């Protein structure tokens, strides 16, 4: 679905081979503390999710979401997400509960048109399906009403003839992964699919829900 609500294509099954090329490289993931780059009013909300969480009686319906990947591929994907710093382990006891059940989220893929990975296969962007968690929160509007796309930069006027404004397309690549929310938010972003803990933190056995 695009930003106009129009359906563009069906959700794709996730595999590590197709998803990895669209993930951030190096140490950029979670490298910027979001509280350090937002204003005091927004920062207060982001520092404590309890201020925006809805009570059971204020939630009409919590949709279901699932991870659109095989257990084997999901394990591989989570191992890579953990390696680059996008996800971490969340104890099951901390998962948000509403309407008598754990609020867990899904994931699926969207093809990046015209892109191929190093093996020649298509590149699939990882989309985290957060509708269950979103249904339990008040919307934080922030500066949404004033956000613009890159095309608006073309209308910037530089009054000094000697001034040069430079920006790069790389600034937009994987930018969603750059910012790090406080740890108190992690229990809201838990996936419904579990992976063996040994894949992420060592030889300990068992299944664990993952937060991104």
Image (cartoon, helix red, strand yellow):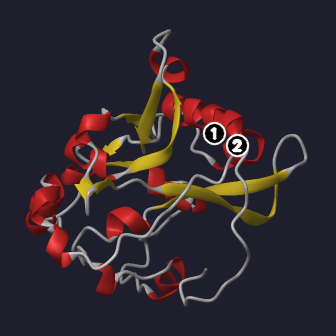
Residue displayed at 53% across by 61% down: 172
Q: Is residue 160 left or right of residue 165?
A: left
Q: Secondary structure at mark 1?
A: helix
Q: Is residue 164 above or below residue 66?
A: below
Q: Is residue 111 above or below residue 205?
A: below
Judging by the rendered image, the residue that carries numbered circle 1 is: 74
Q: Secondary structure at mark 2?
A: loop
Looking at the image, the residue that sits furthest to the front is 100
Tell me the quadrant of the picture where the N terminus can be found.
bottom right
Task: Assess disc 1: are there few (<14), some (14-19) or many (≥20) residues with their C-alpha within 10 Å of its C-alpha.
Answer: many
Q: Is residue 79 visible?
A: yes
Residue displayed at 58% across by 52% down: 67
Q: Disc count in the image?
A: 2
Looking at the image, the residue that sits furthest to the top is 203
**Residue 17 image offset from top left, x and y in percent:** 77, 40
**Residue 149 image offset from top left, x and y in percent:** 49, 80
Q: Is residue 178 visible?
A: no
Q: Distance between the Cα atoms at labels 2 and 1?
A: 6 Å
**Residue 126 image offset from top left, x and y in percent:** 61, 54
- Identify which residue, 30 or 184, lies in the foreground: 184
Judging by the rendered image, the residue that carries numbered circle 2 is: 70
Residue displayed at 62% across by 58% down: 108
Whether pointer 2 and pointer 1 mark residues with C-beta atoms closer than 8 Å, the reply is yes
Task: Judge depth for marks 2 and 1 and give the one in front.
Answer: 2
Residue displayed at 70% across by 50% down: 14
């Amino acid at each position: 679905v695009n930003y106009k609500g129009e359906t563009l294509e069906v959700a794709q099954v996730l595999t590590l081979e197709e998803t990895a090329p669209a993930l951030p490289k190096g140490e950029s993931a979670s490298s910027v503390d979001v509280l350090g780059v937002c204003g005091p009013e927004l920062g207060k909300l982001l520092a404590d999710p309890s201020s925006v969480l809805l009570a059971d009686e204020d939630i009409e319906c919590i949709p279901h979401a699932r991870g659109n990947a095989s257990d084997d591929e999901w394990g591989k994907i989570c191992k890579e997400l953990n390696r680059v710093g996008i996800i971490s382990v969340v104890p099951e006891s901390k998962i948000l509960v509403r309407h008598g059940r754990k609020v867990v989220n899904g994931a699926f893929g969207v093809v990046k048109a015209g892109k191929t990975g190093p093996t020649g296969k298509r590149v699939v962007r990882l989309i985290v399906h957060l509708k269950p968690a979103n249904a339990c929160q008040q919307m934080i509007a922030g500066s949404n009403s004033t956000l613009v796309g890159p095309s608006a930069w073309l209308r910037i006027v530089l009054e000094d003839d000697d001034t040069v404004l430079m920006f790069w397309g790389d600034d937009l690549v994987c930018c969603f992964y750059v910012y790090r929310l406080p740890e108190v938010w992690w229990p809201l972003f838990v996936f419904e699919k579990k992976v063996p803990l040994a894949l992420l933190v060592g030889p300990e056995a068992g299944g664990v829900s993952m937060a991104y």
